[in-house]
Image (cartoon, rainbow, N blue to C red):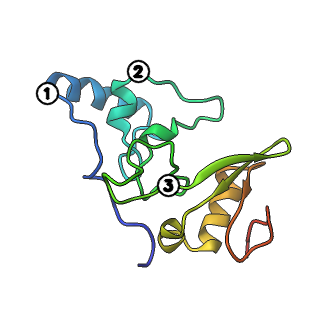
């Protein structure tokens, strides 16, 4: 597989017509969190969740094609056939260990670049790289 699949039409919390109208208004004001490509934005919105201090949404609503899809997502497990990586800690740093399934969707270089841009200060743990090393080239 080359790159993650488009999951815009998959793994979305159902909304009724009135909710859909309210969601669309919220989505216009929150383009980062409102993008359904790799995040269940409808579920995040319907649950009344707020973004973390870093602007990220909860792992609960990450879709399997999200670079940091984790075992904390409601879409990780035998019901979907997708298994998320694991967040951990090493010293004062958060770490992320992707599953082999994820590294097939996200090659090491691309995942490393994602971490450099969107997860500064966190460590990416991957097979084939020394613990904590993030590939950047």
Whether label 2 touches label 3, CB < 8 Å: no
Residue shown at 66%/54% (left/top)?
96
Q: Where is residue 89 drawn, in percent x and y?
A: 75, 45
Residue shown at 71%/77% (left/top)?
128
Q: Is residue 46 above or below residue 126?
A: above
- Counting labels gives 3
Q: Which of the 4 quarters of the picture holds residue 91?
A: top right
Q: Which residue is mark 1?
A: 17
Asked if residue 49 lies left or right of residue 68, the reply is left
Distance in Å between CA atoms under marks 2 and 3: 24 Å
- Label 3 environment density (alpha carbons within 10 Å; few <14, some 14–19, many ≥20): many
Name the residue nearer the viewer: 83 or 68: 83
Residue shown at 27%/37% (left/top)?
13
Name the residue nearer the viewer: 61 or 101: 101
- Precedes in sequence: disc 3 or disc 1: 1
Q: Nearer the viewer, mark 3 or mark 1?
A: 3
- Label 2 environment density (alpha carbons within 10 Å; few <14, some 14–19, many ≥20): few
Q: Where is residue 114 drawn, in percent x and y?
A: 62, 59
Q: Where is residue 126 drawn, in percent x and y?
A: 68, 68
SS for dot 2: loop
Q: Which mark is residue 84?
A: 3
Q: Quadrant of the C terminus?
A: bottom right
Whether label 3 touches label 1, CB < 8 Å: no
Whether label 1 touches label 2, CB < 8 Å: no
């Amino acid at each position: 597989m080359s790159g993650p699949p488009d999951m815009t039409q998959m793994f979305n919390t159902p909304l009724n017509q009135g909710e859909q109208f309210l969601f669309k208004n919220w989505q216009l004001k929150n383009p980062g969190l409102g993008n359904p490509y790799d995040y269940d934005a409808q579920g995040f919105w319907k649950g009344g969740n707020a973004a973390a201090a870093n602007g990220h949404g909860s792992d609960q609503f990450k879709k399997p094609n999200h670079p940091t899809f984790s075992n904390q997502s409601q879409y990780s497990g035998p019901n979907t056939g997708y298994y998320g990586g694991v967040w951990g800690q090493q010293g004062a740093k958060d770490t992320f260990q992707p599953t082999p399934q994820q590294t097939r969707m996200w090659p090491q270089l691309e995942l490393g670049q994602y971490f450099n841009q969107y997860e500064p200060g966190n460590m990416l743990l991957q097979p084939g790289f020394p613990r904590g090393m993030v590939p950047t080239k």
